[in-house]
Amino acid sequence: MVCHMKTTLVIDDHIMKRLKVEAARQGRTISELVEAALRRLLESARETHPAKLPPLPSCKLGGALVDIADREALYQAMEGR
C-alpha cells in the first residue's frame, strides 16, 4: 500500500519557475522532481553521516531506597510515611 502525504512548501519564485521548466522538460510532475531531490538529499546525508548515535550518559545514583517488590514499603516511600 502506497501512502502519500500532501503538504505545503514555500519555494522561492525563481526556483519554482526553474522547477516548472525542468518538470516540463523531463515530462514529470513537480511533485515527482521534488520528491526525487529530497530522496537524493536524504540518502547522501545518510551515507555521509551514518546513523551512529552517541552512547547514552550514565551515572551512579546509589542503591535503591525502596524494594519495589515490597508494595507496602513502596507506598510508604511514595506517601512520605
Image (cartoon, helix red, strand yellow):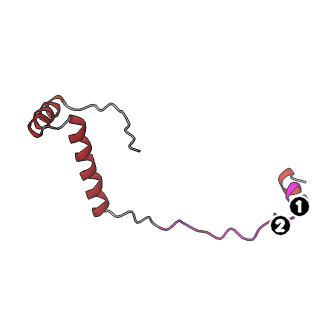
Tag 2 residue: 67
Q: Which residues are magenta?
A: 55-75
The numbered mark, 2 or 1, whose residue comes first in the sequence reads 2
Q: Is residue 54 left or right of residue 65?
A: left
Is 38 left or right of 66, judged from the image as shown? Answer: left
Number of numbered discs: 2
The residue located at (89%, 61%) in the rendering is: 73
Say if 11 sits above or below 73 in the image.
above
Quadrant containing the N terminus is: top left
Q: Position of residue 37 (x, y in %)?
A: 22, 46
Asked if the magenta segment contains residue 8, the reply would be no
Q: Are marks 2 and 1 in contact (CB under 8 Å)?
A: yes
Q: Is residue 60 magenta?
A: yes
**Callout 2 secondary element:** loop
Quarter of the view holding residue 24: top left
Residue 43: mark in rendering: none
Q: Nearer the viewer, residue 28 or 43?
A: 28
Q: Quadrant of the C terminus?
A: bottom right
Q: Which residue is mark 1?
A: 73
Residue at the image point whose x is 37% and y is 38% from the top: 4
The image quarter in which residue 68 lies: bottom right
Position of residue 28 relative to residue 52, above or below, is above
For badge 2, the amino acid type reads: Asp
Predominant secondary structure, magenta span = loop
